[in-house]
Amino acid sequence: MANRRMFSKDVVETDKFLNMPLTSQALYFHLGMEADDDGFVASPKKVQRSIGCSEGDLQILASRGFIIPFESGIVVLVHWKQNNYIQADRYRKTVHKEEAALLQNDNYVYRLDPTCIHPVSSLDPQDSIGKDRVGKDSIELDKDNIDKDNIYVCSELSPVSKMDTEKTEPEKVETVEVEPVPSGYKIILLDKSFYEIPLEKLNFWKESYPAVDVEQEIRNMEAWADANPTRRKTRNGVVRFITNWLKREQDKGGSYQRGSSQKGAAFNAFDYIQKQISGGGENDYTGTGF
């Protein structure tokens, strides 16, 4: 038996072949590698088990007309002559003479000889084998039982293989967590660890509380947590603590507005003192700081 085998594109690149499950396609290639010089495989189930396929894959190959199974357990690849040409000086005739006698070569395609009485194979889902074994009946079987989901050959058969049934499930997409960009601010917690405020959170709070100087208020929170060790927050409660703090400041009018009022008051007091030093009267003062 030769160590090299060939496969014709006219066989393995057809829709009929490519519409089979991948496990059935793989089994076909492995059977081709194990076949003798006439395309017969003595132990197809051994090949099937060795590559992790199921018996359903053999049944699909039979029903699709890519192999012909015999009662003896031997199978032959239907398109063997189309796939392979073996030089006469290297050719070794098959030892499976009884099975070979049941076949005829029809334009490089094996067909069962209609003049012979054919044994029924256990792989064949039909009750008998006739001249249409790989023809019309096989096509009708495929149409009714295989093409719907490419898993079952017929209703009483088990799934082709675990590999093919799992392929119908959606693939799981792994999510990768990205480390948040730190803002540089961190608040000490009750367990003495620190909650580092992400930059994204800081920007979100600035947008949510526009009247508040958020960064200054966070510095105030840092100082408060440092000065009150028994009242520090837990990791689960610190975000709520920050948002409540900022909300109160927003409701009070915001730290920006209160800061402006304090600066105005300080300016008015300074202006009043300057007027007094320069001899201005009390009525000359028009400020509102006092």
Image (cartoon, rainbow, N blue to C red):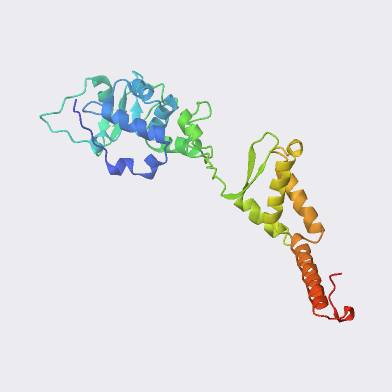
- Image quadrant containing the C terminus: bottom right
Q: Nearer the viewer, residue 273 or 137?
A: 273
Horizontal placement of 235 versus 153: left or right? right
Q: Residue at x 18, y 36 (%)?
A: 85
Q: Residue at x 79, y 67 (%)?
A: 261
Q: Nearer the viewer, residue 87 or 246?
A: 246
For the image shown, how many numbered marks are present on the structure?
Answer: 0
Residue 253 versus residue 233 in the image, above or below: below
Q: Residue furthest right?
A: 283
Q: Quadrant of residue 241?
A: top right
Query: Which quarter of the figure has residue 113?
Result: top left
Which one is in front, 77 or 104?
Answer: 77
Name of the residue lying farthest toward the top: 72
Split into 4 quadrants, where in the image is the N terminus? Answer: top left
Residue sitting at 81 percent across and 78 percent down?
275
Residue 243 seen anywhere in this rendered image of the structure: yes
On screen, residue 254 versus residue 166, left or right, reads right
Quadrant for residue 88, please give it. Answer: top left
Q: Is residue 112 visible?
A: no
Left-right relation of 206 to 12:
right
**Residue 245 percent location from the top left of the image:** 76, 50
List x then y, in percent, for residue 247: 78, 54
- Residue 44 appears at what percent x and percent y? 34, 23
Choose between 135 and 199: the one closer to the eye: 199
Q: Is residue 136 left or right of residue 7?
A: right
Residue 134 position in % (x across, y down): 37, 34
